[in-house]
Image: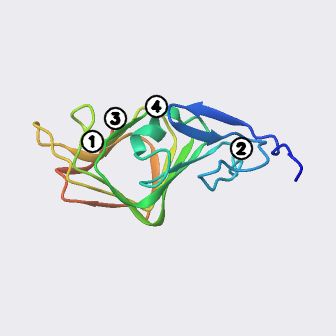
Amino acid sequence: MKNRKAPRRLYRQLGTALILLAGAETSPPTEAAETTNATGGRLILVGHDRALKLPLAAAKIAQPGDRVRIDAGTYRDCAVWRTSNITIEGVDGYAHAKDISCHRKAIWVFYASPVEINNVQFSGAQVRHRNGAGIRYGRLVLRNTWFHNNQMGIIAHD
């Protein structure tokens, strides 16, 4: 049996996660991923059985044009997103961000725009000032997004 070299793969090591970069020939061994999305950005996969376990991990590495796909399930996590022009979507049902607020404001806090969010639900946001929100943001597009049992739904920037 001949020893054949595996096809050239381009990966970027990010902590314990491997993210497939545009132009790579195959996906990482444990993740099914596309090389690029429609905007030319990366596809970042989040889920309990994936290298990136929580939305917070995706928020730390997201770049403009990226699409973040979060497997359906409950994530007791908060995230601060500082990247513009991203899409975040729940896959195979709702991704449910729950119970933990960042910056004493919201479950997800955004400091850049635009952002599109699809198939995500937010619940359990509570802060001391009684205005805990699912999302704190200024400009975004929401589709199939559900807010329940929060002190507030969305709080906008000034």
Give the amino acid type for the residue marked by disc 2 in the picture. Gly
The residue lying toward the viewer, choosing from 5 and 110, is 5
Estimate the spatial distance between the alpha carbons at disc 3 and disc 4, rounded to whole Å.
Answer: 14 Å
Give the mark, 3 or 1, whose residue is nearer the N terminus.
Answer: 1
- The amino acid sitting under disc 1 is Ala
Q: Residue at x 86, y 46 (%)?
A: 4
Q: From this viewpoint, is residue 83 visible? A: no
For the C terminus, the image quarter is top left
Identify the element where label 3 is drawn. Answer: loop
Residue 53 higher or lower than 157, as above or below = below
Task: Please determine whether, in this image, residue 4 is positioned above or below residue 80.
Answer: below
Nearest-to-viewer mark from 3 and 1: 1
Q: Which mark is on residue 106?
A: 1
Determine whether, in the image, residue 139 is placed left or right of residue 84.
Answer: left
Q: Position of residue 52 (x, y in %)?
A: 47, 44
Q: Residues within 10 Å of mark 1 (few under 14, many from 20)?
A: many
Q: Earlier in the sequence, mark 2 or mark 1?
A: 2
